[in-house]
Image (cartoon, coloured by chain):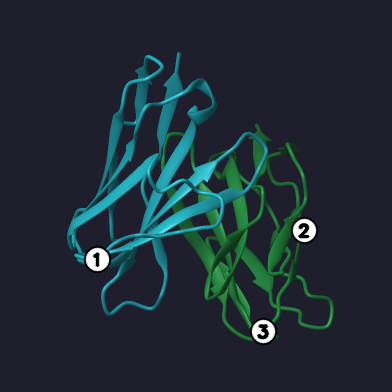
Chain colours: A cyan, B green
């Protein structure tokens, strides 16, 4: 099946630094990529939707200047958490919608961010 | 608004026991319904889906029926195995995906 890979799977950083998380579709082209945030015992929260070559669409309440999303190609999207703070610590998951597919989402393994 | 409510876990069962994980939804239109599974250390994977009322999705011995009258999509399996231990997410798709909180299942030998 279609594979989506996220990197890094775990990252620890100091408060005030920026962290980049990559999301790649390994064997298909992704029309759209989605970034989710998962809080403990909460559902996945959609942060933003990105299409290749255009600006990401952010959900209400998500700071676009803090969570920078770049969708440089049909196989790569990146999420950069800028000036990270401890409250940004969370599990971030990306997913991709296969171009020409049935609408099924393919998910990455997730990235655990811990901000000290 | 559109949302999914699923049964809280964790759920612990003995091997070969019957499994039900409840899921109900609220939607303004006609959603498609999904169950995703997340095995330890892996991303979410589609387990099964149903796109219209009365459809039954099935895969790997799991089943769920799209019940419009009760707005439900309960996940069932007649005989669970240790390898079914994972977190299960119910989701609906209507313009975008909405996920439940996930239910952790542990199956003990």
Q: Which residue is mark 3?
A: B29
Using the image, name the chain to which the residue with label 1 belongs: A
Tell me the residue at 20%/66% (across/down). A29
What separation in Å lies between label 2 and label 3 (alpha carbons)?
A: 21 Å
The residue tagged with tag 1: helix, strand or loop? loop
Image coordinates of residue A102 in percent, x first then y, are 38, 78
- Of the two numbered discs 2 and 3 in the rendering, the one whose residue sits closer to the viewer: 3
Image coordinates of residue A60 in percent, x first then y, are 55, 57
**Which labelled disc corresponds to residue B22?**
2
In the image: residue B3, left or right of residue A4? right
What separation in Å lies between label 2 and label 1 (alpha carbons)?
A: 39 Å
Tell me the residue at 30%/29% (across/down). A19
**Up-down: is A23 above or below A112?**
below
Q: Which quarter of the image is occupied by the N terminus of chain B?
A: bottom right
Using the image, name the chain to which the residue with label 3 belongs: B
Q: Which residue is mark 1?
A: A54
The residue tagged with tag 3: helix, strand or loop? loop
In the image: residue B27, left or right of residue A51? right
**Up-down: is A2 above or below B14?**
below
Residue A7 showing in the rendered view: no
The residue tagged with tag 2: helix, strand or loop? loop
């Amino acid at each position: 099946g279609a594979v989506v890979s996220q990197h890094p799977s775990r990252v620890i950083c100091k408060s005030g630094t920026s962290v980049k998380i990559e999301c790649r579709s390994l064997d298909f082209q992704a029309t759209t990529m989605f970034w989710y945030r998962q809080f403990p015992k909460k559902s996945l929260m959609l942060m933003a939707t990105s299409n290749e070559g255009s600006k990401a669409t952010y959900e209400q309440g998500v700071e676009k200047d803090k969570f920078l999303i770049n969708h440089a190609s049909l196989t790569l999207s990146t999420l950069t958490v800028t000036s990270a703070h401890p409250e940004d610590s969370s599990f971030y998951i990306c997913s991709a919608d296969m171009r020409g597919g049935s609408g099924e989402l393919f998910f990455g393994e997730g990235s655990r961010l811990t901000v000290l | 608004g559109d949302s999914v409510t699923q049964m809280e876990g964790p759920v612990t069962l003995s091997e070969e026991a019957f499994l039900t994980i409840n899921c109900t939804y609220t939607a303004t239109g006609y959603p498609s319904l999904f169950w995703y599974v997340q095995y330890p250390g892996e991303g979410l994977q589609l387990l099964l889906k149903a796109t219209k009322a009365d459809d039954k999705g099935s895969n790997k011995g799991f089943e769920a029926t799209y019940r419009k009258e009760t707005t439900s999509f309960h996940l069932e399996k007649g005989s669970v195995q240790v390898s079914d231990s994972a977190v299960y997410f119910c989701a609906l798709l209507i313009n975008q995906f909405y996920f439940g909180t996930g239910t952790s299942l542990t199956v003990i030998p």
